[in-house]
Amino acid sequence: MPVKQTLEKRIQYRIKRSKDAVFMLSDFEDLSDKDQIGRALRKLEAKNIIIKVGQGVYARAKISKATQKPIPEKDIRSIAVDVLKKCGVKIIESEFEKNYNSGISTQVPTGRVIGINKRVSRKIGFNGNYIKYAKVSG
């Protein structure tokens, strides 16, 4: 008789095997209902397997060599871009990036401002560093 795996183990296996480093609650909806998935994700967060970077948004974690605390595997901009793509938002070069790339400005963009094509209210960040959105026409 096969051993039945817990929801937490099934989610952990899916996270470990995935090529993505960013996960949304909706990625696991085929396994169970939202409440149980949320509980399982909180347990995995306590075990430092994932980190919450937004409401219903998690990133695969690694342990920082400097602080010995969990940090996301990817940088916060890459995480935000992945989440926005999953939500169907088109990423457009922001005004800061356009100015820098065309030589108008010598100030290097921080990467914390992402140009988008429609309104987004999703707050994405980690450790006090949050992404800002700039609506760009085009």
Image (cartoon, grey):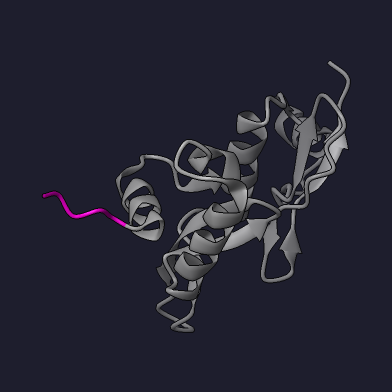
Q: Is 34 within the magenta?
A: no
**Total numbered labels:** 0
The magenta-colored residue range is 1-5
Q: Quadrant of residue 38?
A: bottom right
Of residue 127 and residue 108, the one placed in the foreground of this image is 127
Q: Position of residue 92 (x, y in %)?
A: 74, 26
The secondary structure making up most of the magenta span is: loop
Q: Is 2 within the magenta?
A: yes
Residue in the picture at 34% in, 58% down: 6
Q: Is residue 80 left or right of residue 73?
A: right
Of residue 57 and residue 68, the one placed in the foreground of this image is 57
Q: Is residue 73 above or below residue 70?
A: above
Q: Is residue 33 left or right of residue 70?
A: right
Q: Is residue 47 above or below residue 110?
A: below
Residue farthest along the top direction in this orientation: 138
Q: Position of residue 120 (x, y in %)?
A: 83, 37
Can residue 135 be seen here?
A: yes
Q: Position of residue 72 (x, y in %)?
A: 51, 61
Residue farthest along the bottom direction in this orientation: 67
Q: Quadrant of residue 113?
A: top right
Residue farthest along the front direction in this orientation: 1
Residue in the picture at 40% in, 51% down: 11
Residue in the picture at 32% in, 52% down: 16
Q: Is residue 80 above or below residue 92?
A: below
Can residue 103 be seen here?
A: no
Image quadrant for the C terminus? top right
Residue in the picture at 43% in, 41% down: 20
Q: Is residue 81 left or right of residue 11?
A: right
Q: Position of residue 32 (x, y in %)?
A: 49, 45
